[in-house]
Amino acid sequence: MNELQQVQLSILQEMDRVCRKNGIRYFLFSGTLLGAVRHKGFIPWDDDIDVVLLRDEYERFVGLPPEEFGPNFFLQTSDTDLEYNNVYAKVRRSDTTYVESYMDHKRINHGVFIDVFPLDGVPSNRFLQTIFWYPISVLGYTASLKAFKKEPKPHLIFPFVLLKTLSPLSGGTLMKAYGKLMGMFDIGRTQKVGFLTHAGFPLGHVVYEKSWFDRTVDLEYEGLSFPAPGEHHKVLTQLFGEYMNPPPEDKRVSHHGATLIDLELPYQEAIHEI
C-alpha cells in the first residue's frame, strides 16, 4: 500500500465509523469491491476508493451535520461546497491535497478523497430501462462536459458537443436536473437499482437486482473489515465479467489524472505554492 492509498484508507475508516454510529448501510463497490475480493485490499495499480449507498441511505448520509466527522474530514456535496456541482459525494481529508485534472479550475476542497455514490431505483422492464437510460446518458454526459474540464469520447462527439454548445444552461443547472432525473423512480418501490452517476456506461453494467444489496457481508480490505453486498459475486460479474482474471499488464494503469498531489500540505497551502 502506497502513501496515497494509506490516506484514502483512513478516510474509508472514518466513513465506516460515522456510518456505524448512525446506523447507515453502505457497501464497497466497483474497483474497491473487486480489490477486496481479488486482492484483499487495493488493486495494486488503482488509486481510489468507491462506496455506494441505496438512495434513501445516501440521503441520510449526505444530510449528516459536519460535526459527525472528525477533524480534517469534509463531506463534500453540491450543498456543502457550492462549486462542486456533482451528483455524488466525496469524503475528503482537508489536511492533504489531490487536485483532479478535470476539476482543477474549481474553487473547492481539493483534499484526498473517496467517492460516495447513490444507487437509484430503475424500472424492472428492460424496454423501460432503455427508454429511461437514454435521457440519463445524454443529460449526464452533457452536464459533465459543461461542468468539468472533460473532452467528449470520440464516438460521442457530435450529439454531446452539439448539446454542450447549444444549451444556454450552466453546468451546475444541468447537474441539478440530472440529479432530479436520477431519482425519478422511488427506490422503495422498485426491484432493480442503477448506478446512474456514470452516464455513458453500457446499461447492462449498471443495473442490478435490489435484492443483491439486501444484506451485507464483511470483507477483508488491507487487514481491516468493511461491508460489501451480500451478493457481491453477482455485482462483480455484472460490472466486470470474469472478474477474478486480472487484465493484461499493459492495461494495469490508473484512470484518474491529478494535477497536484501533496500528502503533507493542506490543499489551500499546496495550491498557493504553485
Image: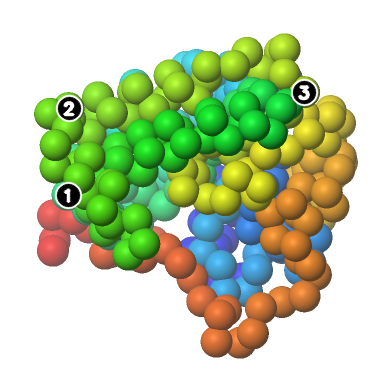
Q: Which of the image's four quarters has the C terminus?
A: bottom left
Disc 1/disc 3 C-alpha distance (Å)? 40 Å
Q: What residue type is labelled 1?
A: His
Q: What residue type is labelled 3?
A: Gln
Residue found at x 71% / y 27%: 125
Marking on residue 105: 1
Residue found at x 36% / y 34%: 139
Query: Is residue 96 positioned above or below 1 on the image?
Result: above
Query: Is residue 110 positioned above or below 221 on the image?
Result: above
The secondary structure type at the circle numbered 3 is loop
User: Which residue is the site of mark 3?
Assistant: 191
**Residue 234 pos. (x, y %):** 83, 49
The secondary structure type at the circle numbered 1 is loop
Judge by depth and name the residue closer to the eye, 198 or 157: 157
Disc 3/disc 2 C-alpha distance (Å)? 34 Å
> Which image quadrant for residue 156?
bottom left
Judge by depth and name the residue closer to the eye, 29 or 70: 29
Residue found at x 67% / y 24%: 123
Classify residue 181 as left or right of residue 131.
left
Dot 2 alpha-carbon crowd within 10 angstroms: few under 14, some 14 to 19, many 20 or more? few
Query: Is residue 19 positioned above or below 268 on the image?
Result: above
Marks 1 and 2, the one that precedes in the sequence: 1
User: Which residue is the site of mark 2?
Assistant: 169
Q: Are marks 1 and 2 in contact (CB under 8 Å)?
A: no
Judge by depth and name the residue closer to the eye, 98 or 201: 201
